[in-house]
Image (cartoon, rainbow, N blue to C red):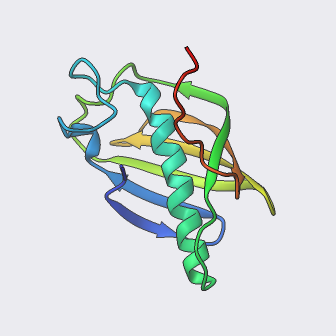
Amino acid sequence: MCLWDEVAGWDARSIRLRARSHRDPGNPLRSHDRLRAIHLCEYGAQAMAVHGGLRAREAGGAAQPGLLVALRGVQLHVARIDDLPDALECEAEVLVEAEASQQYAFRIRHAGALLAEGRAAVMLGAPLPTSTPSPL
């Protein structure tokens, strides 16, 4: 699942993206025919992943798998986003990075109005969780 439609610009430290997927009735994050603002955290996390992929490709490699481990300072300024008519716009920037982790700040806007902001931390190279049957 990729929620972003286009990369508006990027450099080694930041990325800007646009999406209209919040208007799609088939958006996999929707429930009860709505897309709530909390899902903007997923949009922010995917902005990080797109940025990591672009940086890795520019360096001649592939992006490491990552596992979202923390969200901090998240502020949501709306309750839902499926009713917004124009594109969502995201700015994400690297705050801290190490060999095995990264922390980004993200801000998501609609028509200039701030919808959500926060920080997200990812552990790189972590094995992705697999589904296992419950021992019940």
Please state the horizontal and vertical placement of residue 46, each as a whole percent of the image.
49, 50
In this view of the protein, which residue sits in the foreground, 113 or 34? 34
Horizontally, is 86 left or right of 80 in the view?
Answer: left
Which residue: 54% across, 57% down? Answer: 49
In this view of the protein, which residue sits in the foreground, 111 or 18? 18
Please state the horizontal and vertical placement of residue 63, each as a whole percent of the image.
59, 68
Please state the horizontal and vertical placement of residue 80, each as a whole percent of the image.
34, 23
Residue 96 occupies quadrant: bottom right
Picture layout, residue 62 above or below residue 88: below
- Outermost residue, front side: 136
Horizontally, is 20 left or right of 58 in the view?
Answer: left
Which residue: 50% across, 61% down? Answer: 50
Which residue: 50% across, 33% down? Answer: 116
Residue 62 occupies quadrant: bottom right
Residue 97 occupies quadrant: bottom right
Please state the horizontal and vertical placement of residue 60, each as a whole percent of the image.
60, 86
Horizontally, is 83 left or right of 7 in the view?
Answer: left
